[in-house]
Image (spheres, coloured by chain):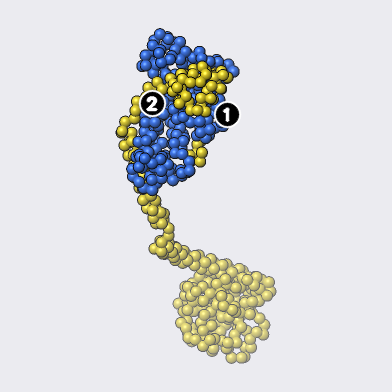
Chain colours: A blue, B yellow
Amino acid sequence: VDQNSDEALLAAHLAGDPDAFRALLERYRQELFHFLVRLLNSRSAAEDVFQDTFLQIHTSAHSFDPTRRFKPWLFTIAVNKARDYYRKNLRRNPVSLSTPVSEDNDAAAMVDLLEADVPGPESPLADAERSRLVKQVVDAMPPHYREILLLSYFQRLSYNQIAELLQIPLGTVKSRLHAAVANFAGAWKTARVHDGPES
Amino acid sequence: MTNASVPPDPVPSDAASSWRLSPEDAVAIDALLSEGLREQSAGVTGTPRQTAANRCLRLLEDYPVTDADDLLVHATLARIERHDRDATHRMKIRPAADELVGRRRLRLSDFVSVAAMILVGVGATIPMLNYVRRTSMETACANNLRIAGGALHQYATDHEGNLPMVAGLSDPLAPFSWKTLRNSENLNLLSDLGYCEHGHLNCPGHAEGGPAYSFQVQVPGRRVPWGVGPVIAVIGDRNPVLDAARSGRTVEATLSTANHGGRGQNILCSDGFVQFTKSPMLTDKDNVWLPRTRNGEERFDTNADFGDPADSCLMH
């Protein structure tokens, strides 16, 4: 069964194959879980949303269009479930006061990636310290930036696929991804300055 | 995408950023994305700006993530199984709910019970309504007789104390006959002469044709005075014994009038009082339906002493 495509596995599940759905789960266990952990900044939240996502897949399997690909559908549902999680936990996780906020894009600081102070492979920055800083920066990003950055980088989705998945115009996808990259690079640079490049 | 319903994007405006990408970097990012960001960032190819973007984005790989354990798959499958079990349980409950709704529908036994209750209610109500109806008719009848009494009094005042009698109505020399007797015409003088309304001489309980009231027999030459002498019945409900005699039937002389269903009769006496009596016996020896013979007996006899001012004999 594992040799089958995602779409074939889902069809087999609908046909009553008891192993097909487990195979789908196993196939996306790490990929979806990692995506959700990065998106939600919580292992337990990622586990909950993971279960919600596959429960939705199970209950909506009959509505899946077999002419389309399974993976974008899976991540569309996952993103929606993650947004539900944001809404439910919005009051419990207020935006940090230290998070830089600006309502005017014209007033935003220009980021030049050539000057983003990104350490190369030869950088003396310890792996653990770099991981800590990356996590700090990513977790501080607005959820919609985190969402589009993770979809484009880790899920290797194109602009069109992201636009279809998030149900937003193509131009919005581009501008949002640009803003997300700028946010990440700018926050990284700021974090490096505050943390000290020698650390 | 048609495979999933995506709610409107709830995120805020993209203007809420503290940093803005330079136009050159935006071009570089677009170029990278066209090939796949992760693939490009894995190598160190492209322009220096693309290389810088690659290096920046590759930092995302350093986000600390541990793998999901096997329990996540088991937990997910268990949750789905629990969901399916609950859904099946709900499906089982639904027919029971339908059955419950069905129980609320009227069954034949419910219908019979309701019908029985209605019948009992109606059965208890109808006698009460009949009683009220009877009582009201008896009262209306008594009121008629009181008005007729007033009319008689006025008539007697105007006619030397005598009761109304149509002149030449009966031949005093002719033999008395029950069938030819037209005594009610004497009473009708009251309405004919305007002493009362015609309706006042009609009992509301009288359903048959003909006179509703019987009047003290008026015999030429033996006129009964009003308000003087012994108290006798002057006007009363229709005499049932006379009706039976005219139709050739034999009935009890103590039969009550049909005007009030045989329960009794209203009688106006010569003293002006009206009373409802269950028996036609005004006194022990005076049956208001019967004439008195010359030997003092009360019975139907064409040779009776009609016109006795001391004997009640109501006929129509």
Seen at 57% across and 82% down, the residue is B307
Residue at x-position 55% and y-position 77%: B238
Residue at image position (36%, 47%) is A16
Give the quadrant of residue B71. Answer: top left
Q: Position of residue A99 (x, y in %)?
A: 48, 17
Residue B67 in the image: x percent, y percent? Answer: 34, 28
Q: Residues within 10 Å of mark 2 (few under 14, many from 20)?
A: few
Q: Residue at the location (36% across, 16% down)? A: A128
Q: Is residue B148 left or right of residue B89?
A: right
Expressed as whole percent of the image width and height from the top left, the position of residue B254 reads 46, 79
The C terminus of chain A lies in quadrant: top left
Residues at marks 1 and 2 touching, judged by CB atoms closer than 8 Å: no
Residue for badge 1? A171
**B24 and B45: which is toward the camera:** B45
Image position of A69 with respect to B237: above or below = above
Q: Is residue A39 visible?
A: yes
